[in-house]
Amino acid sequence: MAKYLVIVESPAKVKTIKKFLGSNYEVAASNGHVRDMPKSQLGIDVEHDYEPKYITIRGKGDILANLRKEVKKADKIYLATDPDREGEAISWHLYHALKLEDKKVYRITFNEITKNAVKESLKNPREINMDLVDAQQARRVLDRMVGYRISPLLWAKIKRGLSAGRVQSVALRIICDREDEINAFIPEEYWSLDVLLDMKGEKKPLSAKYYGTKDGKKTISSKEELDGILKDLEKASYQVKEVKKGERLKKAPLPFTTSTLQQEASKTLNFSTQKTMRLAQQLYEGIDIKGSGTVGVITYLRTDSTRVSDEAEAMAKEYITKNYGEEYAAGTGNAKKGGQKIQDAHEAIRPTDLSRTPVALKESLSRDQFRLYQLIWKRFVASRMTPAKYETTSVKIAAGEHLFTVAASKVLFDGFMSVYTSDDEEKQENNRLVKEIDENTLLTFNSFDSKQHFTQPPAHYTEATLVRALEELGIGRPSTYAPTITTILARRYVTKENRNLYVTELGEVVNNMMKEAFPSIVDVTFTANMEGLLDKVEEGVVGWKTVVSNFYPDLDEAVKQAEKELPEVKIADEVSDEICDACGRQMVIKYGPHGRFLACPGFPECRNTKPYFEKIGVQCPKCGKDIVLKKTRKGRKYYGCIDNPECDFMVWQKPSDVKCDKCGSVMLVKGSKLVCSNEECGNVTENKKKE
C-alpha cells in the first residue's frame, strides 16, 4: 500500500512522476484550481477586512472526494503544484479543501519533470510559502474587484456580455493608443542617393550611400535638394578619403523567458501566444519517448528569469565542447537582464537534457511540438556559446564637398551563429566588399540611383510586440500575457489580421468609456506600480490586505460616480432612413457582438435584418455614389463604396471630399491635415473643415 501521496496539478504529469517514484508513492492530480470565489457574486467581504469567500469550483467535487480517499491512506502528503505564485495558492487551497491540518504535509517544487529533479525535491520539502499565496490572493482579489464592479457598468451603458479587467483594459488601451498614433501620422518625404562606382579589375560596380557634407550627416528632404546635390556632383571626381577596419563581437542571445519565447515563436513560427504556451506546457509535462518512457523535455515555462543552474551550465559546456569544439564553449554563462522586477525563482526555459536533440526526438513529437522544441534547444545551446566575430570595413568617399559611405562586414568566427541565427542576422550578412580597397584605389563614376521615400507610421501591434510592450512597461507577469491577449480577442475588442492587431468599433467604445470613468485603471504607470506592490507582498514587505484596502475605496467611488454621470452609448435603437423590405417599417440601428446592424423594430413578428453602413457625406471618386464606413469580417474598420462589389473603391483612413491639387487623388483626413491617398505623391495640406 502507498505510504506517500504526491498531488500535482495536471493529470498529464501523473504518469510521468509515478514512473520516477515507485510503488511506495501514489500520484494524483487536482486538475488545476479546486476552490475559487463564487461566480454569482463579488465574493469579497468589503465590510470585514476584505476577506475572500472561497467555495469548491463546480465540477471539482468528485476530484476532491477521490483525493480525500487517497489522503486517508497516506502517511505523508506532498503538494507538488507548479513552482509559482498560482501553484503555491493551489497547494494552500488543497490544504484547506482536503482538511490536511492533522496530517504530515510538505510542499515540494521542481523546475523540470525529470527523475533527478523530482527525487531532489522530495529530499528538500518545505512549508507552504504564505507570502507567495498572499501575492496570488491579492492579484485575484484585485482582478475580481475590477471585473465585478466595472463589467456590470459596461453591460448597462453599452451592451450585455462585455467585460473589463485590470490588465486586459490596459492592454486594450495600449493598442488603441497605437491606432490613434497611426491615424494621426503625417508621412514626411525624404530621398536616398546611391552612387555606383567602377573599380579597376572588378566587373561589379561598388555601391556607396550618400552621407552628407564635410560638416556632417545630411538628410535629403525634397526633390529640389536632391537636384542641388546632383548639380554639385556633375563634374566631381571620387576619391577614397578614409578606410577604417575593425572587429565587432556579436554576443550570444540570452536563453528564453516566457515573454521572449512567445515573441520568437510568433515571429519565426507564426504561433499565437496561446498556442506557444499550450505546446510548451506539453513539452514540460512529459512526452512519450521511445526507449525512455514519459519525460519532461523542457524546464518550467512561466518565468521571467534568464538564470541557468550550475548543472545545466556544466551540461551545456560538455555538450558544446564535444560537438562543436572547445573554442565554441563560453567560459561563463550570459548574465541575466537587469532592470525590471524579475521573479528569479526559476531558471530560463531550456531543454532538460541536451543530448535529446530535436532530430532525436522528431518521431516522438508532433510537427508543432518539434518546431517549438527545436527553437528552445537551439536558443539555449547558442546562449552558452562564444560570441560571433566580424571584421568590419568602413569606407568614406569624397566627391567635392560631399561624402558617400560604404560599410561592409565578413564573419571571422561564427561562434553561437553555427547553431542559431535570426532572420534579421541572415539579412545583414550579405554586405561584403568585392575586393580590398584603400586610399590609392581608383574610382570612376558609373551612375546615380536616387529614390523617393516617405516616413512610415508606427507598426500595428502584433501579439509578439504587444507582449514585449507589456513586459517593458511592467504590466502583467509571465502567466498573464497569453490569457490577456486571448480575452481581448474573444471579446471582439481587438481583431487579428495577417498577424496585426486592430481595434474594433466595440473596442473603441469600451476603451473610451474606461478612459473617461476609470482613468487610473487603464493608466499604464498605475498598473505597473500595482505589479510592483504584488512583488512586495511576495517578498513579505507589504501585507496583501493593505494593497487591497488602499485600492477598493477609490474604485468604489469611481463606479458610483460613473453610474450617475456616464451616458448610455445610444447605438441600439437609433432610427435609420432605411425602410424594411418585409413590412415597411423604419429600420433601427442595433448593436450586436459584431458591431452595428439594421433590424426591423417589429421584432419578433418581423425578423428582417440588414448590414448597417454609416454614410460619411463623401462621394466615391470612381462612381459618384456614397462612401460608407464598413468593417472586414473580423471587425476592422475601413471606408468603401456603398455599391460594392460593382465598385471596388476602398481606403483604410477616412476620405475627404477634397481632391489632391498635385495628382487628383482622394485626400485622407489625418487630424488637422489632409494627406494624399497616392503614396507616390505625398502631398500634405491643411484640413479647412472641422472634423
Image (cartoon, grey):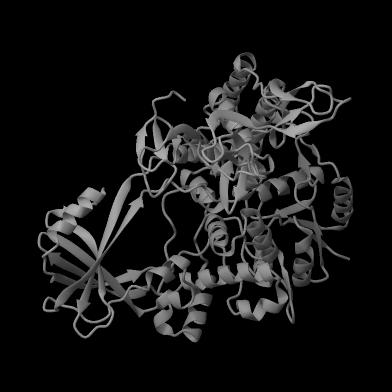
| Residue 459 percent location from the top left of the image | 47, 48
Q: Residue furthest top?
A: 564
Residue nearest the observer in this picture, 9 or 276? 276
Residue drawn at 54 percent across, 57 percent down = 263
Q: Is residue 1 above or below residue 559?
A: below
Viewer-closest of 295 and 17: 295
- As drawn, 146 above or below 414: above
Residue 633: x and y in percent read 67, 45
Where on the picture, by quarter, is residue 554? top right
Decide if residue 3 is in sight here: yes
Residue 522 image point, x, y percent? 54, 32
Front position in the image: 306 or 159: 159
Q: Is residue 201 above or below residue 255?
A: below
Query: Looking at the image, which is closer to me, 16 or 460?
Result: 460
User: As drawn, is 40 to the left or to the right of 482?
Assistant: right
Question: Does residue 272 appear left or right of residue 313 in this picture?
Answer: right
Residue 476: quarter of image? top right
